[in-house]
Amino acid sequence: MTNALSRLLEKRDWLMADGATGTNLFNMGLSSGDAPEMWNEEHPDRIMKLYQGAVDSGSDIFLTNSFGGNASRLKLHNAEKRAGELSRISAELGREVADKAGRPVIVAGSVGPTGDIMAPMGPLTHELAVEIFHQQAEGLKEGGADVLWLETISAPEEYKAAAEAFKLADMPWCGTMSFDTAGRTMMGVTSEAMVKMVEKLENPPLAYGANCGVGASDLLRTVLGFAAMGVERPIIAKGNAGIPKYEDGHIHYDGTPELMAEYAIMARDCGATIIGGCCGTMPDHLAKMHEALSTRPRGPRPTLEQITELLGGFSSATDGTGDLSDAPTRRATRRRKV
Amino acid sequence: MSDEEDDIILSELSDDELVDQMMDDLYDGLKDEIMEAVNILLERSWEPYDILTRPLVGGMTIVGNDFRDGILFVPEVLLAANAMKGGMSILKPLLVETGAPTIGKMVIGTVKGDIHDIGKNLVAMMMEGAGFEIVDLGINNAVEGYLEALDKEKADILGMSALLTTTMPYMKVVIDTLKEQGKRDDYIVLVGGAPLNEEFGRAIGADAYCRDAAVAVETAKSFMARKHNRAPS
């Protein structure tokens, strides 16, 4: 393994990833409705400031501003032809920031979902999905990304299509899914099902895990689910800074930097190796997380009770793993016996 | 499974058995079987409206309930909705011909500033699966676009979706404009999206916040029932 992330993983037993992209860019003046990827070209200074914020807070890995930089998403802004180019620029800007950091910092080329539902349920075919992901992957590679970073995926079919595309681009990669529906992804994937799916891939990721979703508690329950499956690849935990709350006409994420520091420590104790934030996670949060990860000792694997005590309750009673003998089952139909 | 399938010959089932089998087949997402069964019931002189409401909407209600209860997930529900649409493609022209009451018509889109549409797409697909007519305005809709479509389509329901905390307040702009123009009571306004909650829905004056696509369908159905009951017959 000659890539920068593998080298770093050999030397360290935890790495810190970055926080939010969207939340930070909105604070810098991005209008909602605009594609953030356009800023790679229009406001490279602000994108580099976003990256620099993560680096200055201690992140070992940051994700490029290319989450929606695939043809399927950019089509909504009539920019589908620019997917490769905008992705390339996002990585070039990242390279510039990382190379000046004075320590190894990984530029991870962010690849988000296509936003389309895959066949047979929806219109997106496997072949087209591979093509869309491949195009973006080549752009990120050309721009100098160290690894590709698939994130916020719900459908196993889409995850597999990306894995295939990344092989075509000959790039190492990481990939996380978003467990936002009663502990599963929107498409019903449990942490257990993800492990089984990933470990069967012809081109498996260097590391995998969960990002975004509901809150820090749910995310850690998912990480415990990965760990319970005996996952040997590094596990990634990138949770939101709490849950958005609507109070007195304002909306804010309820996770404080102190709370996210607790989350980071617990994520590591749950078995995660790569720990970061997602929506709502600002440089202040990252700095506290880094301080906690650097100074506090490892502890025993937390129980579900300890997670809820410290970080708040779960969004659902179960996450579809473990003992399901009490869980309701599918209707027995005549054609398909349960 | 294929052995089981061979055992069932839809045309040999009694009406009641066939309705039960259609509910099963919807649950299993079997489009061809649903279309075949709809044609059989039409040959047996069933009213199109009865076919729509008994086996199809009835079957989708079971699917919706199991989705709500975490037994089924989006892929299964989309397959069921697709099977339902197969049946609807046969029934729709007949329903128009016979002047049967429609289940309801919904204008849906993500609000101005919001480009996240997968939740909206799911709601549209499931609403369609439940027999509603859907006018999908896509992403990034300004208040004028919503109002024009509601008026032009003679819609019953307005569905607005937002994924961002920065865009959800725009829903209030749309509702306030409806109020100003005296049109608020003409429509059922449903809102949804990951960062929303019931409290927010109430605060902006929506009729309901819908947690997920299944809840959206149920909520739309119950509001439409109330609307029909209110209407002078």
Image (cartoon, coloured by chain):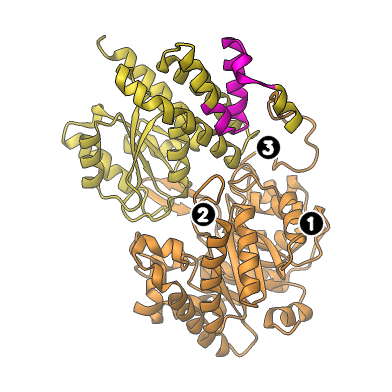
**Figure check: A297 above or below A239:** below
Please tell me whether residue B31 belongs to the stretch shown in magenta: yes
Nearer the observer, A308 or A332: A332
Question: What residue is drawn where x is 34% and y is 78%?
Answer: A42
Q: Mark 3 and mark 1: span between their CA atoms?
A: 19 Å
Name the disc covering residue A317, or none: 3
Name the disc covering residue A145, or none: none
Q: Which chain is orange?
A: A
For discs 2 and 3, the disc positioned in front in the rendered view: 2
Give left or right: position of A16 versus A68: right
Quarter of the rendering occupied by the N terminus of chain A? bottom right
Residue B211 makes an appearance in the image? no
Which stretch is magenta? B8-35
Q: Earlier in the sequence, mark 1 or mark 2?
A: 2
Q: Mark 2 and mark 3: span between their CA atoms?
A: 33 Å
Q: Which chain is yellow?
A: B
Task: Give the crowd class for mark 1: few <14, some 14-19, many >=20 residues within 10 Å.
Answer: many
Q: SS at mark 2?
A: loop
Q: Quadrant of residue A197?
A: bottom right
Q: Where in the figure is residue A62, as x and y percent of width and height? A: 57, 74
Marks 3 and 1 on same chain: yes
Which residue is the site of mark 2?
A124
Task: Give the crowd class for mark 2: few <14, some 14-19, many >=20 residues within 10 Å.
Answer: some
Is there a contact, CB below 8 Å, between mark 3 and mark 1?
Answer: no
Q: Where in the figure is residue B40, as x and y percent of width and height? A: 52, 18
Q: SS at mark 1?
A: helix
Which residue is the site of mark 1?
A227
For discs 1 and 2, the disc positioned in front in the rendered view: 2
Give left or right: position of B19 versus B210: right
The disc labelled 2 sits on which kind of residue? Leu
